[in-house]
Image (tube, grey):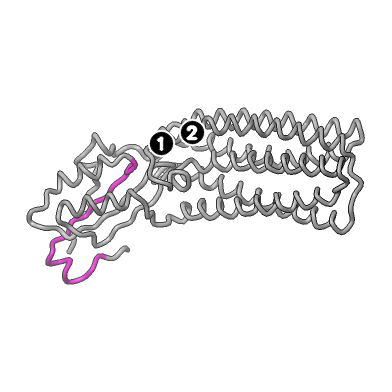
């Protein structure tokens, strides 16, 4: 019934090479940025834990172990970049290892959610049974944490901005599913911690000079709710890519506009992400006598983010008998 599936790459090598199973843009800058933040966080963590043991400060110890969760998050991101780089181009990945980035982001979202729930539990406990707060030590810890996280956020944001310009922008979705979710997850971790540090500084100042000790757990709870919301959103976006969620974006509208210009209609269309900024398209069309298939292939292949396109054209007679179905 149907003509054999023809890959756009077979006839348009210049726009869609047949041998590029990884479909990855360069991620070396992002990998270096995450590596720098990993070492910075690890040094801060060890400094706080050692100082906490030497001085007997529970505030330093608590913040040191809290910093350990961010070291773990940066470790996940760094491992994902290393894994993608080492396995790029290997034939046993049908579309390359690009989705490891989203798997790492999903794992980081679970870690973020765990931190947020722990913050909410601790805040509720301290509201019921207030602890004595050593304000001077706690303020020093909060300021140190804020400096480390602001520096980390600056490192990640600069490379995230450069990385986004390596591939084409696609409306508002570029900041979500089309962006490097692994780098975004790392960035959310340090920004979330920076916000909690600011909240802690405000609460500690209010507690020390205005006697508002209750504000410390309240600010911690608000920070936990905010982080939990970010974690939920990051998990949903990453899971959608891992499950090959159909993309509804400006790219989809461009594809339909291209088909309309050629006077054909789609019987079956699937558009999904392979890697940050790289899409795959599976398209079955109801052909027409006036269809210039080569020109259509060229226009689809020229769309910058379409890294892999499979095109199947069936006659109008066949398409009117039974709709195309995915097998």
Up/down of 104 relative to 54, above or below: below
Earlier along the polypeptide chain: callout 1 or callout 2? 1
Using the rendered view, name the quadrant where residue 145 is placed: top right
Q: Quadrant of the C terminus?
A: bottom left
User: What kind of element bears circle 2?
Assistant: helix
Measure how far apart labels 1 and 2 are at the Cα level.
26 Å
The total number of labels drawn is 2
Provide residue 176's location: percent of width, then percent of height. Answer: 48, 47
Q: Residue shown at 28%/49% (left/top)?
A: 254
Question: Residue 307, located in which quarter of the rendered image?
Answer: top left
Label 1 packing within 10 angstroms: few (<14), some (14-19), many (20+): some
Residue receiving disc 1: 89
Q: Give the number of the mark in front: 1 or 2.
A: 2
Q: Which residue is mark 2?
A: 161
Judge the density around disc 2: few (<14), some (14-19), many (≥20) Cα neighbours within 10 Å.
Answer: few
Q: Residue furthest left?
A: 289
Q: Residue furthest front?
A: 210
In the picture, the quarter occupied by the N terminus is bottom left
Q: Which residues are magenta?
A: 305-324
Q: Residue 288 occupies which quadrant of the picture?
A: bottom left
Q: Would residue 87 be visible to someone looking at this image? A: yes
From the viewer's perspective, is 318 left or right of 230?
left
Asked if residue 54 lies left or right of residue 40, the reply is right
Residue 288: image tag: none
């Amino acid at each position: 019934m149907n003509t054999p599936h023809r890959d756009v790459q077979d006839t348009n090598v210049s726009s869609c090479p047949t041998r590029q199973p990884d479909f990855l843009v360069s991620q070396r800058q992002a990998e270096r940025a995450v590596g720098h933040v990993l070492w910075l966080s690890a040094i801060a963590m060890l400094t706080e834990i050692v100082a906490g043991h030497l001085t007997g400060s529970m505030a330093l110890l608590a913040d040191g172990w809290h910093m350990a969760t961010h070291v773990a998050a940066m470790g996940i991101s760094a491992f994902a970049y290393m894994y993608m780089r080492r396995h790029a181009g290997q034939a046993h990945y049908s579309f390359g290892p690009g989705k490891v980035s989203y798997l790492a982001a999903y794992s980081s979202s679970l870690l973020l959610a765990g931190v947020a729930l722990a913050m909410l539990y601790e805040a509720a406990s301290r509201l019921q049974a207030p602890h004595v707060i050593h304000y001077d030590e706690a303020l020093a810890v909060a300021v140190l944490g804020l400096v480390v996280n602001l520096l980390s956020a600056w490192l990640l944001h600069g490379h995230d901005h450069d990385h986004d310009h390596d591939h084409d922008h696609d409306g508002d979705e570029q900041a979500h599913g089309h962006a490097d979710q692994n780098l975004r997850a790392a960035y959310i971790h340090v920004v979330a911690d920076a916000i909690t540090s600011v909240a802690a500084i405000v609460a500690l100042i209010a507690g020390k000079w205005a006697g508002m000790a209750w504000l410390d757990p309240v600010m911690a709870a608000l920070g936990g709710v905010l982080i939990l919301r970010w974690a939920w959103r990051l998990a949903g976006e990453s899971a959608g890519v891992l499950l090959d969620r159909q993309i509804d974006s400006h790219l989809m509208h461009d594809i339909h506009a291209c088909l309309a210009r050629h006077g054909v209609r789609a019987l079956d269309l699937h558009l999904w992400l392979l890697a940050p900024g790289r899409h795959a398209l599976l398209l079955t069309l109801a052909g027409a006598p006036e269809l210039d298939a080569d020109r259509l292939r060229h226009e689809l292949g020229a769309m910058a983010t379409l890294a892999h396109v499979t095109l199947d054209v069936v006659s109008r007679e066949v398409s009117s008998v039974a709709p195309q179905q995915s097998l």
